[in-house]
């Protein structure tokens, strides 16, 4: 009897233990999965984001988004794009982190808030640096320009809320990661480069325990690239390109056929993540290559757009298809990051079982690593900053270990080429199957599962899920830009100068720095009887990226000048490869650099939205493979705007050109149009520093070896040489003169004493922001006077007689070649004679600028986005 009682008691205890432990487990599972998404905001990335946002929050709760800033988008554009998407989806509660200005010391000490703008091997104490891996991503059309703007769709479709990038207020990527992961168990979705995640893991090893799992889209293990293959009936004339390669870096397969873009962006960071000890599920090219966007899926998507998010995704997919570089879109464009979202959600919903059971992909465990350097190991050939010239390797790495070989220096690295007919041998970024101590067991998606509905036209199960989820009414977007306001309308403002005398024709060439926008407003305020601004040319190889052209359109719209054409120039320096960052690498990418310029220091979103904007729309007439839906909206190029203006000139007219950035556009114009100089009367160049024995220093502060160049000349020295030494009549506004017009206090005081207009208010806000940033963070913003001085050229060109200027004539030449000297302007008795501004009345300059902006003539027709919102909320009169 006692034995029976004992057995009954034991059974009762087991049942109670099962009940309470089981109940506790159920309670744990009942809590939603906390998710952090790290993304480079490429097109397929926000497909993945929207798929995730549509899930039931009681199961999957997206807590934070961090932006990968060294891949397909630039930080300033990417963060505002994310804010707009979240606003549409009513998810302003989600934290967003981007950038940071911390550095990595030479001994490998990682400081707080490293921004992830550079791969770990290049990261020093600045956000300026080389594009060793990122050069694989095109900079202009079909690259970062199109992704930064989402082909022009982000501004035409998405609503704009209150959240925006603001300098020193924007949460950094590392801060958001730390706060999110510290708060509780978190799952990471990684669909960009791995820099942010690696930095977090290397600096917060104590928080690894809070990361439950890492889901990664990236790499290629056993994949064979299906693109770039020759048709069966092509014969011997067809040469295969990427066909059969494990990787997909289409710009660099001849040197590295093994890497996939997300891993190649920072191989050392990817290695750190993979070898972190945290469970990893990888969705590589092996799987994504089996789920291309088929024609059947595309047209099924076209028929199912029942929510704003579905419409936005389809519009994005369609413009990507319509601008595709060949006729093989349906076999070349895949569901990359969106497939990761689907596979990860399904695995988690199924309890994250060991075998990774899910609806959408077949899984398998493989032993892999990430290749970060090439054999033989232990070499010191100048390619590997983690080892070369160091007694102790950086980050405590092992001498002669797997990281100590040759590291690919760029797409044209001679080390990577075997011969003219063979594929490249570099393996940097390859997710390679290995054995031994370097092997990490990873759960890998092998291929996409077929649709269980055999009668469906959709060949993959995930196709059906993607369309179903995006079209769910639950958790759907509230509105787009046009439906956000009951009386939304697009109006182009064009002045009527029919009965007014027009002044001298002017073309303004700018690189869209903060100072350039002040100069643009000044030119627009100058009476049309004095100057007739015919066009604006912008370059994308200066202080802002090419997508910032949208702010130019907004300023013109504000000032009622939607009639002025805007031409987009080159994104790389004259005579340099179209993939690279030869000189623009000297511009910081974080605070005080392109991050701030691309958002106009947080003020861009306060401007009224112009109906004009950059779009990827194109036509066969201009060399595109096909016409898009609205080819008339195609973005004009700088040479086209030049040709249009020069052809429309009266016989007696000649053009005055004002340049405020690198001389890339003007150099290209006089290079390709041999008659261009006949149409140009004068050129005013803001930039340069004339070295004439008076101890004048340059301002390229990120290149210490170059002591005498000024940024505009440094950013394109070959263009500067071509323009400066041409037969053009040139007036130079050098750095030494600009520095005499660089007092924030005096110009702000002048603006405050003058009458208030929308344009003077804009100028005051921008100048106040630059001044305050310099005072608060002088280490990051010490160079703000550069932009204040850029206004001087416009004033000298228009109203020099009011400033009592002193000019000098000197023969000069521009230095090219060695990085320590490029962009220097030296006095040379055999050089070209140019006019150089030496001195002027600075007090008159500040007062004149303020008085002109306070004038009620030619003032803004619509002051701000807030005013625009009010207008769109009322019926038109």
Image (cartoon, grey):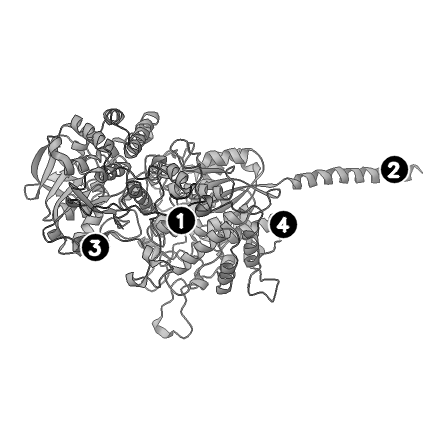
Q: Do the residues labelled 4 and 2 touch (CB within 8 Å)?
A: no
Mark 1: few, some, or many residues within 10 Å (few <14, many ≥20)?
A: some
Residue 798: x, y in percent? 15, 38
Marks 4 and 2, the one that precedes in the sequence: 2
The answer to whether residue 456 is left or right of residue 501 is: right
Q: Name the residue under label 2.
A: 6
- Whether residue 492 is visible to the viewer of this picture, yes or no, is yes
- Compute the Cα span from label 3 to label 1: 27 Å
Marks 3 and 1, the one that precedes in the sequence: 1
Q: Is mark 3 on a helix, strand or loop?
A: helix
- Compute the Cα span from label 1 to label 2: 75 Å
Q: Name the residue under label 3.
A: 644
Q: Mark 1 points at which residue?
A: 156
Marks 2 and 3, the one that precedes in the sequence: 2
Pick whichever, 417 or 479, lies toward us.
Answer: 479
Q: Nearer the viewer, mark 3 or mark 4?
A: 3
Residue 794: x, y in percent? 19, 38
Q: Mark 4 points at which residue?
A: 354
Q: Is mark 2 on a helix, strand or loop?
A: helix
Q: Is mark 4 on a helix, strand or loop?
A: loop
Q: What element carries label 1?
A: helix
Q: Are marks 4 and 1 in contact (CB under 8 Å)?
A: no
């Amino acid at each position: 009897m006692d034995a029976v009682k004992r057995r009954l008691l034991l059974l009762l205890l087991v049942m109670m233990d099962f009940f309470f432990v089981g109940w506790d487990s159920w309670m744990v599972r009942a809590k939603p999965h906390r998710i952090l998404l790290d993304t480079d905001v490429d097109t397929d990335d926000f497909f993945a984001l929207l798929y995730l946002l549509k899930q039931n929050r009681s199961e999957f709760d997206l807590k934070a988004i961090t932006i990968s800033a060294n891949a397909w988008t630039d930080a300033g554009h990417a963060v505002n794009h994310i804010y707009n998407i979240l606003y549409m989806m009513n998810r302003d509660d989600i934290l967003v982190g981007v950038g940071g200005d911390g550095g990595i010391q030479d001994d490998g000490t990682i400081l707080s808030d490293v921004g992830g703008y550079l791969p770990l091997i290049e990261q020093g104490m600045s956000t300026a640096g080389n594009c060793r891996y990122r050069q694989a991503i095109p900079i202009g059309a079909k690259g970062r320009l199109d992704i930064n703007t989402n082909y022009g769709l982000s501004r035409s479709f998405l609503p704009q809320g209150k959240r925006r990038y603001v300098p020193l207020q924007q949460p950094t990527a590392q801060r958001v990661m730390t706060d999110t992961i510290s708060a509780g168990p978190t799952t990471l979705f990684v669909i960009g480069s791995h820099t942010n995640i690696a930095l977090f893991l290397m600096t917060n090893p104590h928080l690894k325990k809070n990361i439950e799992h890492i889901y990664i889209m990236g790499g290629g293990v056993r994949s064979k690239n299906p693109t770039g293959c020759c048709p069966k009936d092509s014969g011997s004339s067809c040469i295969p390109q990427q066909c059969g390669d494990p990787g997909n870096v289409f710009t660099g397969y001849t040197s590295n056929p093994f890497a996939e873009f997300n891993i190649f962006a920072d191989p050392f960071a990817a290695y750190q993540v993979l070898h972190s000890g945290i469970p990893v599920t990888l969705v590589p090219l092996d799987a994504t290559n089996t789920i291309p966007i088929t024609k059947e899926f595309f047209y099924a998507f076209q028929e199912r757009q029942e929510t704003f998010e579905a419409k936005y995704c389809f519009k994005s997919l369609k413009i990507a298809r319509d601008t595709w570089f060949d006729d093989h879109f349906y076999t070349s464009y895949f569901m990359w990051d969106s497939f990761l979202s689907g596979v990860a959600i399904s695995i988690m919903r199924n309890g994250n079982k060991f075998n990774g059971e899910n609806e959408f992909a077949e899984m398998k465990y493989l032993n892999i690593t990430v290749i970060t350097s090439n054999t033989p190991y232990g070499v010191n050939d100048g390619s590997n900053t983690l080892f070369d010239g160091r007694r102790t390797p950086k980050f405590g790495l092992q001498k002669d270990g797997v990281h100590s070989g040759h590291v690919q220096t760029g797409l044209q690295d001679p080390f990577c080429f075997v011969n003219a007919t063979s594929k490249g041998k570099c393996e940097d970024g390859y997710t390679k199957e290995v054995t031994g101590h370097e092997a990490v067991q990873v759960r890998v998606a092998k291929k996409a599962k077929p649709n269980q509905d055999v009668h469906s036209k959709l060949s993959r199960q995930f196709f059906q899920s993607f369309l179903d989820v995006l079209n769910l009414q639950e958790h759907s977007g509230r509105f787009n830009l046009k439906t956000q306001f009951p009386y939304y309308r697009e109006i182009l403002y064009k002045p009527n100068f029919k009965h007014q005398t027009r002044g001298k024709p002017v073309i303004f060439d700018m690189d869209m720095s903060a100072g350039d926008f002040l100069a643009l407003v000044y030119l627009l305020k100058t009476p049309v009887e004095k100057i007739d601004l015919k066009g604006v040319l912008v370059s994308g190889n200066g202080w802002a990226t090419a997508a910032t052209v949208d702010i130019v359109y907004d300023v013109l719209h504000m000032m009622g000048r939607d009639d002025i054409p805007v031409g987009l120039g080159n994104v790389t320096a004259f005579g340099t490869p179209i993939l690279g960052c030869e000189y623009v690498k000297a511009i910081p990418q974080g605070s005080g650099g392109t991050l701030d310029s691309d958002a106009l220091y947080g003020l861009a979103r306060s401007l009224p939205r112009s109906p004009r904007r950059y779009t990827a729309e194109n036509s066969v007439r201009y060399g595109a493979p096909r016409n898009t839906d609205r080819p008339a909206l195609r973005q004009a190029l700088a040479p086209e705007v030049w040709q249009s203006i020069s052809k429309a000139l009266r016989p007696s007219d000649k053009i005055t050109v004002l340049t405020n950035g690198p001389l890339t556009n003007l150099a290209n114009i006089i290079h390709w149009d041999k008659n261009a100089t006949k149409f140009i009367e004068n050129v005013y160049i803001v930039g340069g520093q004339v070295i004439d024995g008076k101890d004048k220093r340059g301002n390229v502060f990120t290149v210490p070896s170059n002591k005498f160049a000024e940024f505009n000349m440094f950013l394109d020295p070959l263009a500067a040489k071509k323009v400066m030494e041409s037969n053009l009549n040139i007036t130079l506004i050098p750095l030494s003169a600009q520095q005499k017009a660089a007092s924030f206090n005096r110009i702000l005081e002048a603006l405050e004493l003058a009458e208030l207009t929308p344009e003077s208010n804009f100028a005051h806000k921008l100048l106040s922001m630059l001044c305050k940033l310099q005072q608060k963070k002088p280490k990051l913003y010490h160079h703000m006077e550069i932009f204040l001085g850029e206004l001087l050229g416009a004033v000298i060109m228009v109203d020099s007689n009011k400033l009592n200027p002193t000019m000098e004539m000197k023969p000069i030449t521009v230095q090219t070649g060695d990085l320590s000297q490029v962009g220097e302007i030296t006095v040379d008795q055999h050089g070209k004679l140019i006019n150089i501004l030496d001195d002027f009345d600075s007090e008159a300059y500040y007062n004149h600028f303020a008085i002109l902006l306070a004038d009620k003539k030619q003032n803004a027709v619509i002051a701000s986005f807030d005013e625009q919102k009010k207008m769109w909320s009322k019926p038109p009169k």
